[in-house]
Each structure stands twice: as C-alpha cells, then as structure tokens.
Amino acid sequence: MSSHRGSPVVDKEKKYDRQLRLWGDHGQAALEGAKICLINAGALGTEILKNLCLPGVGAFTIVDGKRVTGEDVGNNFFLERSSIGCSRGQAAMELLTEMNSDVKGDYIEETADQILETNPQLFKSFSMVIATELLERTLLDLDKLLWEHNVPLLVCRSYGMLGYMRLVIQEHRVVESHPDNAFEDLRLDRPFPGLVEIADKFDLDKMTKQEHMHTPYLILLYKFLCKWKDEHSDQLPKNYKEKNLFKDTLRSGVLTNEEGVPLLEENFDEAVTATNAALVPSRIPSTVQEIFNDPCCSNLTSQSHNFWILAHAMKLFTENEGAGTLPLRGSIPDMTADSKRYILLQNVYLDQARQDSATVSGYVQQLLTSLGKPTDSISETDIRMFCKNASFLQILRCRSLADEHNNDKAKVSDIGMNLENPDSEMAIYVLLRAVDKFHSQYNRFPGEYDNEREADVHKLTSCVSNIIHDWGLHTTIKEELVQEMCRYGAAELHSVAAFLGGCAAQEVIKVVTNQFVPFNNTFIYNAATGASATYQL
C-alpha cells in the first residue's frame, strides 16, 4: 500500500482557503513576503503576532530586552512558568512559531533604545514595525527614524480596560479597497457600442413567452430607458416621482395570461429592484478625482511610484476615450436569464473592459518611455487590476507622531470640540498622554504602587491640567476617569490585549497586502463601555 504526499500548493490552498477568498493569491503572496518587527512581547504584542502567524506572515523579529516574570506568565498566553527568568523575546518566538511552520521567527535580546543607539539601520529592513510598551521619548525617536526611511509604524497600547492604536505612514496607496455595497458599473446612462449592438438584437414584441421571461434585466432596463428617453427629450428619470413612473412602465411590460392577469416574470422584478442603482450617473468619484488632481499624479518623475503612473494614464483615458468616465469594470451581477444570453451579455462587458484596459496600457507605455523606465516595469496584470478597481482607488496619508506632538492649532481645536462631550473617547487620548507625562516626571506610571494611588490621582490630575493648558483649551476631564487610570496601574488585561491584538493584526495585513483601507490614524477602545472611535490626529 503506497502513500502519496499532497502538493505543497494544494495543501497551502486548503490551509489558507478562507483568507484566499478575501485577498486572493497575490494578497497572500504579499503577506508571505512581509517581514514584521515587534517591539516587546507583552500580552498585546504576542496577541498581534499570533494573528499574523496564523494567516502566514513571512517572518517576524521580536525586539525585547526583558526577561520573563511571573506577571508576564499571568497575563500572556504565549509564556509559560518554566520560562520565568528567560529571554521574553525568545520564549514568545518559540511558542509563536509552533503555530505555523510556514512562518520564520527571530528575536533580538536588546531594548528598542539600545538598537536606536547602536544599530538604528536595523529597523529599515522591515516591511512594518509594531511598537508596544514604549515610553513616549523612545517612541518619538523611533517615529523620526522610520518616517525618514518611509517604514510604516503601528503603535499599540493596552492600558487596563483601554486600548489605543496609532498608524504612522507617509503615503499608503490602495488599489483593491473592497468597498461595501458598491454600485455595479453598468453604463446604462451612457451605453457603449457593444451594449447597444447586442441590445438592439432583442425584440421583446417578437419573443416567445419563454424567451421573454429569460431576457436579462439589463436588456429590459436598456430597452425601457430608450423608450423613456424618446418620450422625455432624451432625459433619464431623475427624481423620485420619475423613477416610480419608470418602474410602473417596466411593470406594464410583463406578459399576461388569457384573463389579463400578469405572469410571474422574475427578470422584470429584478429590473424594477435594480432601477435606482442602474440610474446612478456614470461619473468619476470624488476620491478618484482627488487622486487625479494630486501633484504626485500631475508631476511624474523617474522616481514616481507605479500607482501614480497608472493614475496619470487613467486620467488621460478619462479626458480622451473615456469622455469623462473611468474604464469599464467589466463585471455584471447575477440575474434571471438563460445561460446563453447571460454569457453573451457578460462577454460584451468583458470585451469593452479589455478595450479600455488596452487603451490605458498604451498611455502607460508612453509615460514609462518618457520617464526613461522600462516599458515592462508595469505588467498588464497590474494595469487590468487598476482599471477594474478604478472607482475604488484610495490614498491614505497619516501625520508623523512628531507633527501630532507639535500641537497644531487645527488639530487641537478638533480635540477641544470632541472634549465638549465628557463621555467622548477623546478623553482617553488625553489621559494616555497624561500618564506618559506622569512617567517622564516620576519614572513610573500612576497607580503602580497601591500605597501611592491616592497621591497619584492628584499628580495625574495636575498632568492632565497642564496638557490641556498647553493646548490652550478650557475643558476638564472627569475625575472618575483619572481615578480609573490610577486604578489600572498600567496593567495589561489579556481580554483587552486579545481584542486589540486582532484589530492591530488586521491593520498590518491591510498595509502589507495593499488591500482594504487602514484606519486614519488613531483608534481608541474602551472595554468598560464597549465603545470605540477613530480620530485624525
């Protein structure tokens, strides 16, 4: 009896089946090519890495100069009692890599401060750096280094019942943003020649009942819109009243039996349901227009990222062949129709999408040549992907931590407006800044020692007041919130770390795969109330 080992490719497809449905083979390849640095393997840090190891991140390195303590074992599921006294980074790395044999792990038994002083270039080698358990001074030094070398940074913090994340990235370009509830790109308001040609072959009046009931609803909409435009000065239904009248016209097209009772024609029901979405004008979304207007799109150089070259090429398409529209997406929704007609209609949309993509490709080749870059430096696959997602392009630009700490008047004003609501999560942001100020003054966090907790409340209140005064604001933070911060004593609770670890890993995956849109730029979570909020700081 012989045994056969499965193909590595097939095995990997089974192993990562669910996530491959989310971000595809190319997204998985990007994740497997990523090299992540985690600073400090506390409860939160290891939870983040756990959620990156399971989907198959390529490699990670833990930077941690601490030794495992009893406290670590109490709140960190990736450390064992037998590890007490050992390198925390090594102990966590060994257990984390056991979760997925595809992932490579490493550790450096030094603090972030030591590396910043002796070997700062190390951080440049990573796809992304995740910082946990760092003091404000060290964090700002790390931020400066990574910002200069354009390495994304994710700052994460679990503090009692509170969670905090801050994304620092100069420019993040997203092609596959995977928007929810996006309208189909059907172009019924501006039908292209292929659609007109195939639709003209359908004569509803000469069809058999079976053919009538299996005509794709896109054809029905096109036919009835042509009739509507003939009767309304070539205008489409615009307002609520006109759209309802158009739907009534559609319903009147349903066949009836000998008694005059309308037959059940699902394709007509689908056409009525799809009317509002189908009548959304084909135009360039504001977010895409902003990309076209961006100086990076207009002023290309040999150093320009491929995204901007593609954006410029697509802008030329919209100004010429597209006549104010983007390349056709090329997909159509499922609908009631016989297979032959549906496939025929689907191919019409695919053919036009290919034509549009080929036109954009021509512009790309011209631009690459003018920039002195190889004409094959942008693949046809990338061009087709860009055109398919043309309506959903996104650019994310975050501020550096240094800029955030410079107390910009506009941002401070936003903070003040949020603090007008005493229950706003912005109060947590202020308190986290205050505990850092407390630590810089007293070399410990408030509430770390029970016998000083009452005195720490007054000291932390003073820190809060000083911060608010420095910002020029006239507001206060609830006293009970200050007391809670002292009661936390900077402790990490595993439940909070686990939740935040999942959130953080999700954002890392978005950045390294260039899919979906990361948050911009601060996320705050209050486990006590179950509330969360994002702010641009």
Image (cartoon, rainbow, N blue to C red):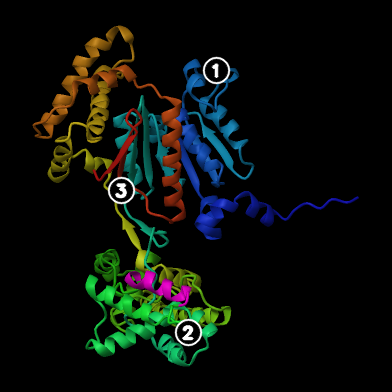
Find residue 294 and report its horizontal and vertical position in percent. Answer: 25, 65
Residue 379 position within the rendered picture, expressed as x and y whole percent measured from the top left = 49, 71
Verify CB contact (< 8 Å) between mark 2 and mark 1. Answer: no
Residue that badge 1 annotates: 84
* Segment tinted magenta in the rendering: 263-277
Magenta stretch, overall SS: helix
Magenta highlight on residue 107: no
Please identify, in this view, whether the residue under mark 2 or under mark 3 is nearer the observer.
2
Q: Is residue 274 magenta?
A: yes
Q: In the rendering, which numbered label is found on residue 520?
A: 3
Can residue 325 be seen here? The reply is no
**Alpha-carbon neighbours of circle 2 within 10 Å: few (<14), some, or many (≥20)?**
few
Residue 453: x and y, percent? 27, 11
Instruction: Look at the picture and state if 230 lies above or below 451.
Output: below
Q: Earlier in the sequence, mark 1 or mark 3?
A: 1
The dot on residue 258 is: 2
Mark 1 or 3, closer to the camera: 3
Q: Give the distance between the C-alpha atoms of the residues marked 2 and 1, in whole angstroms.
A: 86 Å
Q: How many marks?
A: 3
| Secondary structure of the residue carrying numbered label 1 | loop
Q: Can see residue 162?
A: yes
Q: Residues within 10 Å of mark 3 (few under 14, many from 20)?
A: some
State if disc 3 and disc 1 touch (CB < 8 Å). no
Amino acid marked by disc 1: Ile
When asked about the image quadrant of residue 222, the answer is: bottom left
Query: Which of 264 and 496 lies nearest the eye of the viewer?
Result: 264
